Amino acid sequence: MSFWEKLLNAIGNTAGNALSAVVEAIRTVFEGDPETRRKVAFSVAIIALSAKMAKADGIVSEKEVEAFREIFEFPQDQAKNVARLYNLARQDVAGYEAYAERLSTLCVTCAANCPVLEDVLDGLFHIAKADGLIHEKELNFLGHIGEIFQMSETRFEQIAARHVSTGGDPYKVLGVSPSDDFPTIRRRYHGLVSEHHPDRLISRGVPKEFHVIANERMAALNAAYEAIEKERRAA
């Protein structure tokens, strides 16, 4: 039996209280398997909040569905189980705030600027921008999720800046100031590269499919560093 089947069997069929049932199932069904528990918790966070975000602009585009599959690949024989969980989340009476609050408690390392919750936000940004732009309602949704996840305003702006296709502020992407000297910026850049290395994501329980986001994140960090380096050389 797959972990999706175990989870859904523990939840039951009632959409109205799916949130409480999902969280309790993750806590109990996978209690003796912390690695699987981390993977399931992360995956459920992406599925549930993606379903809620789909309501933010009132439209679920094919490109958003494709973006979801890019960061969350699952065996074809589990497609119905994943779809069932997605639909339960979309129909649940609980709002996205409740989902974010409860799912954040599943992160054992949860604290201000928690890296696991940052991974979740990155995934949601990836889906939101799939149709070419991030709508204002989606950005408000993501901003509120960031607050619930206890992301500082600076950290959230840094995450958001990575997903701006053009005109992004390279200093915001790296979380540095234009007044910082270049050695300080270089140290910050190398620290971020180390922090977001794929091996670090694996240790946080992030599914291997999420490496699409990891590669996108690294590309944004590299581009920001190169832009600042070029600017400083020209000065």
Image: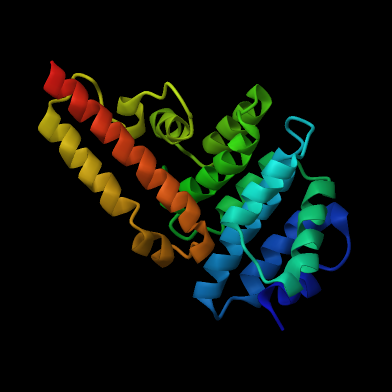
Nearer to us in this view, 14 or 73: 73
Q: Quadrant of residue 217?
A: top left
Measured along the vertical axis of the image, is residue 129 above or below residue 207? Answer: above
Which residue is depicted at the point 65% across and 34% down? 131
Which residue is depicted at the point 76% across and 55% down? 86
The x, y position of residue 57, in whole percent, is 74, 30
Judge left or right: residue 118 versus residue 59: left
The x, y position of residue 189, in whole percent, is 24, 40
Q: Quadrant of residue 54?
A: top right
Judge left or right: residue 184 versus residue 221: left
The scheme the figure's colours follow is rainbow
Measured along the vertical axis of the image, is residue 7 above or below residue 92? Answer: below
Nearer to us in this view, 74 or 136: 74
Quadrant in which the C terminus is drawn? top left
Judge left or right: residue 200 versus residue 86: left
| Residue 207 shows in the view | no
Nearer to us in this view, 137 or 132: 132
Measured along the vertical axis of the image, is residue 44 above or below residue 37? Answer: above
The x, y position of residue 145, in whole percent, is 58, 38
Residue at the outermost top position: 235
Nearer to us in this view, 141 or 109: 141
Quadrant in which the N terminus is drawn? bottom right
The x, y position of residue 100, in whole percent, is 63, 46
Which residue is depicted at the point 79% across and 60% down? 83
| Residue 215 shows in the view | yes
Residue at the outermost bottom position: 1
